[in-house]
Image (tube, rainbow, N blue to C red):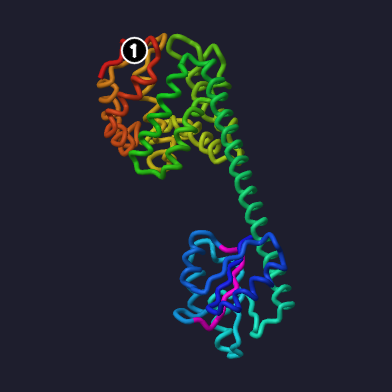
Amino acid sequence: MLVHIVDDNDTNLMLFEQIVRRVDSEVSIACYPDPLAALVDCARQMADLVLVDYMMPGIDGHEYVRRMRAIPGARDVPIVMITAAADRFVRQTALELGVTDFLTKPVDPSEMRVRVTNLLALRRSHLRLRDQNRWLAEEVRNATRAMLDREEELIVRLAKAAEFRDPETGSHILRMAHYSRLIACGLGLADDLCELIFKAAPMHDVGKLGTPDHILLKPGRLDDNETEVMRHHPIIGHAILSGSSSHLIQLGAEIAITHHEKFDGTGYPYGIAGETIPISGRIVAVADVFDALTSRRPYKKAWEMERAKAFLIENSGHHFDPHCVEAFLAAWNEVLDIQTRFADPVELTSVAG
């Protein structure tokens, strides 16, 4: 603990130092006949208790307290003003400036020892509480980080589970997630929402876990009945993910049930249109379709990038939100980079710009 004693009278400094020393021999004490020097040192290393005289040349006790309280970290340091003044205004002003307590001259050594003892104990308690609060805050941050890590792991595992039942590759999930973040950022969405969309997008087809294999893995065109069953996967995905308290999984549920809706209202499962479709669903619709078109599948060849680009433009305002298409195409160089960085091995020679 560090105690500052500020008084222009050398005799008072010696007396007060002796009294404080008797309270705790391990306390560090710094004596200042010059209040400005005390303020400079306080800015370098904050004191734990300050005893300051009121009547001093240059700056008085009021001005000293005002300046000290303005130093970062000084707000909670106990300050005792030592004064012979009985003027009520002097004491009222001192309290308003942040003085903790008073000692009246001539100082009673016993009274000073008690006040110093109590205020140092208060300061120690405050510092312990501050350290505990910092520890608790760090523990909360660590627990929150661990919880978010578990959520993200759950999402990855769900996406992988869906991937094992679907001919789409893991690279598709990576690419469309990156495309989704690219669009979200291009739309000017908040950074934290862009990141949430990036992390939630891989859950878009988790409902395919409930689609029968003979439909999901059928190499040819689906008949009407099979198509109807397949179109039920957004509802299944939403049922799997809904009800969570996690914002990330809530967003995944929203994406799962809306990414097959179309801007003109001709999509499924509910046929909602325009901005009635959540922005996350409108974003993932563009990312998912674009990557599906430009990816090779057992039943089709990958489209060239320019052909897929033309498809987005042609269907802007019909299948897709025009603003999402615009944001996607405005970042075309980044799109090409994502396509290359996360290409399936068999696609490396088939990507065309």
Considering every residue shown, the one lying at the far bottom of the view is: 87
Residue at left offset 59%, top offset 88%: 85
From this view, report whether residue 294 is shown above or below residue 89. Answer: above
Give the residues drawn in magenta, as a range: 47-56
Residue at left offset 61%, top offset 67%: 49
Q: Amino acid at mark 1?
A: Leu
Query: Dot 1 surroundings within 10 Å: few (below 14), some, or many (20 or more)?
Result: few
Using the rendered view, name the quadrant where residue 48 is placed. Answer: bottom right
Q: Position of residue 29 (x, y in %)?
A: 61, 65
Q: In this image, 188 relative to 220: left or right?
A: left
Number of dots carrying numbers:
1
Q: Position of residue 323 (x, y in %)?
A: 31, 39
Which residue is at the front of the view, 150 or 201? 150
Which image quadrant: the C terminus?
Answer: top left
Which residue is at the front of the view, 246 or 16? 16
Using the rendered view, name the quadrant where residue 94 is placed. Answer: bottom right
> Is residue 49 highlighted in magenta?
yes
> Is residue 43 highlighted in magenta?
no
Disc 1 target residue: 348
SS label for mark 1:
loop
Which image quadrant: the N terminus?
Answer: bottom right
Which residue is at the front of the view, 241 or 221? 241
From this view, report whether residue 101 is shown above or below residue 131. Answer: below
